[in-house]
Image (cartoon, rainbow, N blue to C red):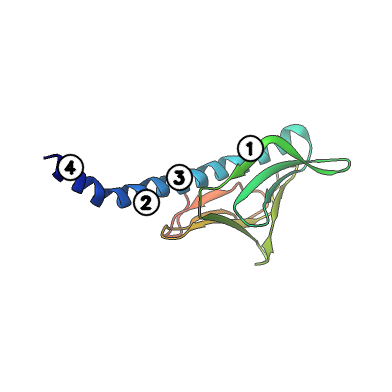
């Protein structure tokens, strides 16, 4: 009996590992959507430009606020993505970017944010116009 359980666990373990990784990627997408809403809200509340910056390797992102000397990292707002997961930003004109700005008047730079990880569906967040918020786009193109 114990041998059968051990064999079943050995067979199921790779699938379970991928299941948990898929959940971590999905959670990272939801967290990123939340951070875009937070950046927009804080920009309006504080009357300052907030910036969502993507690290150079695309493995994390951070939230910054504009100050007189430039943009300053907001403490405890630096996020790493799950292992083997990357993020990329494409502006509305199709150019790649390393940040998105959120303005005090409630406007946002239109862009598409894509989280991707080998073996999993991409998670896409999109802001199509400066007056919209970022929304998660389903694979069929509908918005969540």
Q: Nearer the viewer, mark 1 or mark 2?
A: 2
Residue drawn at (15%, 39%) of the image? 2
Tell me whether the residue at label 3 lies in contact with that at label 4, contact meaning CB atoms closer than 8 angstroms: no
**Helix, strand or loop at disc 2?**
helix
Q: Position of residue 72 (x, y in %)?
A: 79, 41
Q: Earlier in the sequence, mark 3 or mark 4?
A: 4
Tell me whether the residue at label 1 lies in contact with that at label 4, contact meaning CB atoms closer than 8 angstroms: no
Residue drawn at (69%, 60%) of the image? 97
For label 4, the residue is 5
**Helix, strand or loop at disc 3?**
helix
Q: Earlier in the sequence, mark 1 or mark 2?
A: 2
Q: Earlier in the sequence, mark 1 or mark 4?
A: 4
Q: Nearer the viewer, mark 1 or mark 4?
A: 4
Tell me whether the residue at label 3 lies in contact with that at label 1, contact meaning CB atoms closer than 8 angstroms: no
For label 2, the residue is 18
Judge the density around disc 3: few (<14), some (14-19), many (≥20) Cα neighbours within 10 Å: some
Splitting the image into 4 quarters, where does residue 43 fall?
top right
Which numbered tag is attached to residue 24?
Answer: 3
Q: Nearer the viewer, mark 3 or mark 4?
A: 4
Q: Earlier in the sequence, mark 4 or mark 2?
A: 4
Residue drawn at (45%, 45%) of the image? 24
Q: CA distance from mark 2 to mark 3?
A: 10 Å
For label 1, the residue is 38
Q: Position of residue 85 (x, y in %)?
A: 52, 54
């Amino acid at each position: 009996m114990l041998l059968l359980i051990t064999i079943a666990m050995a067979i199921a373990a790779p699938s379970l590992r991928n299941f948990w990784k898929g959940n971590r990627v999905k959670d990272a997408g939801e967290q990123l959507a939340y951070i875009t809403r937070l950046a927009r809200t804080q920009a309006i509340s504080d009357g300052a430009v907030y910036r969502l910056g993507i690290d150079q390797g695309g493995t994390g992102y951070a939230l910054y606020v504009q100050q007189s000397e430039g943009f300053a990292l907001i403490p405890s707002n630096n996020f790493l993505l799950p292992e083997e997961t990357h993020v990329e930003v494409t502006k509305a004109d199709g150019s790649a970017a390393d940040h998105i700005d959120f303005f005090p008047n409630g406007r946002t730079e239109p862009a598409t944010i894509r989280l991707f990880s080998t073996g999993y569906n991409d998670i896409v967040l999109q802001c199509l116009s400066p007056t919209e918020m970022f929304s998660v786009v389903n694979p069929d193109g509908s918005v969540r």
